[in-house]
Image: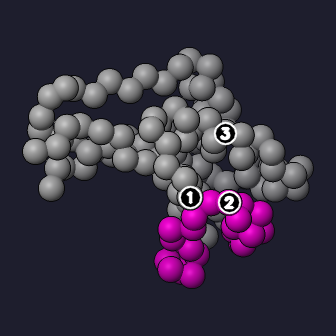
């Protein structure tokens, strides 16, 4: 039986316009779901590399937003939903998992994103 552990962080974006410029700009991210997949202006990104903690991934996404060119940053802020979804596997063995998010990071999240979600996946 596995212990509880961090899996990943997905970035979900819902827009009112074409997301292709943002998708094209973020070549360093994996596009898990594209507008073509859903027929809507929705995209889901994930990092290519794995990181041991949610904080590190969230910081990566914050930096990616901070480094957007002005036109894409303006587009970003017009997107009604910009969601970070932290995924954990619940596990069934000890030790428990405690994953702290520093206040400084939460302030950045509040500045750039509309929601911070947590998804718990059952152990297989």
Relative to the observer, which residue lies in front, 124 or 71? 124
Task: State the quadrant of the N terminus.
Answer: top left
Q: Secondary structure at mark 3?
A: helix
Q: Quadrant of residue 40?
A: bottom right
Residue 38 drawn above or below residue 53? below
Quick one: SS at disc 2? loop
Residue position marked by numbered label 1 in the rendering:
48
Query: 89 or 113, which is in the foreground?
Result: 89
Stretch of the chain drawn in magenta: 17-40
The residue tagged 3 is 62
SS under mark 1: loop
Please tell me whether residue 32 belongs to the stretch shown in magenta: yes
**Residue 86 in picture, x, y percent from top left:** 42, 43
Residue 28: assigned label? 2
Residue 110 among those drawn in magenta: no
Left or right of 78: which side holds 47?
left
Location of residue 13 (image quadrant): bottom right
Around disc 1, counting alpha carbons within 10 Å, would you say few (fewer than 14), some (14 to 19), or many (20 or more)?
Answer: few
> Does residue 60 appear in this view?
yes
Q: Looking at the image, is 110 positioned above or below residue 69?
A: above
């Amino acid at each position: 039986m596995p212990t509880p552990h961090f899996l990943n962080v997905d970035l979900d974006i819902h827009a009112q316009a074409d997301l292709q410029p943002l998708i094209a700009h973020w070549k360093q991210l994996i596009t898990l779901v594209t507008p073509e997949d859903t027929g809507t202006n929705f995209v889901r990104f994930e990092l290519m590399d794995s990181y041991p903690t949610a904080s590190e991934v969230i910081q990566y996404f914050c930096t990616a937003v901070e480094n957007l060119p002005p036109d894409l940053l303006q587009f970003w802020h017009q997107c009604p939903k910009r969601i970070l979804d932290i995924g954990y596997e619940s596990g069934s063995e000890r030790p428990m998992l405690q994953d702290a998010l520093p206040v400084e990071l939460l302030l950045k999240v509040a500045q750039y994103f509309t929601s911070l979600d947590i998804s718990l996946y059952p152990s297989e």
